[in-house]
Image (cartoon, rainbow, N blue to C red):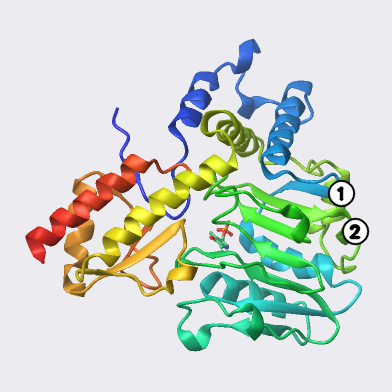
Amino acid sequence: MTRLFNFCAGPAALPEAVLKKAQYEMLDWQGRGLSVMEMSHRSDDYVAIAVQAEKDLRELLNIPDNYKVLFMQGGASSQFAMVPLNLLGKGGIPNYIETGVWAGKAIKEASRYAEGLHIAGSSKDRNYTCTPSQSELQMSDNAAYLHFTSNETIGGLAFDYLPQVDVPLVCDMSSDILSKPLDVTQYGVIYAGAQKNIGPAGLTLVIIRDDLLDQAMAVTPSMMNYRICADNDSMYNTPPTYAWYLAGLVFDWLKNDVGGLEKMAEINTRKAEKLYQAIDSSDFYGNPIAVANRSQMNVPFTLADTALEKVFLAESEKAGLLNLAGHRSVGGMRASIYNAVPEAAIDALISFMSDFEKRHG
Ligand SMILES: *Cc1c(COP(=O)(O)O)cnc(C)c1O
């Protein structure tokens, strides 16, 4: 068995220690004679797994008691609809910051539920190579919330400041949650699909302040209603039990193996700085994003000679560096270097890049 270095944007690499633990517990979870996959979600054993996962997450992110944690389904893309459905029942104008593909999708979906959606800031005119600055943000009258995407997974663009407004902040944190410490009290709603930094696909995390649970539009489907989800401890129907269990193993890994989010952030910063340094120190490679807004999770890069891209991808794969192709909508290369991608993977990539440049530059 050989595990290679996986730079996939999502579903992404998982910590090897987590996969080993899952493998060890696969057939017989803690002497009960069955797999977690085969357990009733109402059983004492499974509820204990679910409760422990939430407890560890709350500890990692320092989530205050007046916030609920919801374990939902449907991916971050379903949240694009759930946010307006759940927050606009009392009226108001949804405000959005436009920073790239994912913010764009959130805006498009929310427009279906809200008349007069307002773009409070956009960097479209700069080809999404930076975020709009705080001073550029212009909120509408009667704003209900401000939505932004903390890390644009495809563009490799991240906010370097927290928007300051007097309405609840709603954040799509799918690709950078748990990569560094977070002040949850600054947000109304945080959501994230699991398959980048949390666990396997199929699970979606929502962290929501209590007072926002009761503003859903009457048409909101029960399965999409935050209040119903909260009142049923995320078990209104059968939750994605195995994905939830695996997320729990990842939280435990972050807490006990890594040593918490301060430590994780230190490692992530080191990983990203190395890779950007390698890109910047050569004319052969390039990255168009403003330095202050460069993502520490997704690092897109181009070759000066685009004709070499196919060769780069073929050779890197042969060298055991998987999934370095950029998103199908933009091309080029992209290295996603989430929490579970070890520093050794970045070292191997940098050394491959330097060697490739020597041979083809
Ligand atoms: C991956 C991603 C999404 C989409 O997630 P799904 O779970 O596939 O719906 C949305 N937003 C961001 C920032 C992402 O990285």
Is residue 124 something one can see in this rendering? yes
Q: Quadrant of ligand 1?
A: bottom right
Q: In the rendering, at what x and y percent does residue 150 appear? A: 59, 64
The quarter of the rendered structure image containing the N terminus is top left
Q: In the rendering, at what x and y percent does residue 219 appear? A: 86, 68
- Pick whichever, 274 or 8, lies toward us: 274
| Quadrant housing residue 168 | bottom right
Which labelled disc corresponds to residue 211?
A: 2
Which labelled disc corresponds to residue 105?
A: none
Helix, strand or loop for disc 2: helix
Q: Residue at x 65, y 38 (%)?
A: 244
- Pick whichever, 235 or 67, lies toward us: 67
- Is the Cβ of the residue at disc 2 closer than 8 Å to that at disc 1? yes
Q: In the rendering, at what x and y percent does residue 243 appear? A: 60, 39
Residue at the disc numbered 1: 66
Label 1 neighbourhood size at 10 Å, few (<14), some (14-19), many (20+)? few
Q: In the rendering, at what x and y percent does residue 159 appear? A: 57, 68
- Pick whichever, 172 or 264, lies toward us: 264
Left or right of 256 on screen, residue 141: right
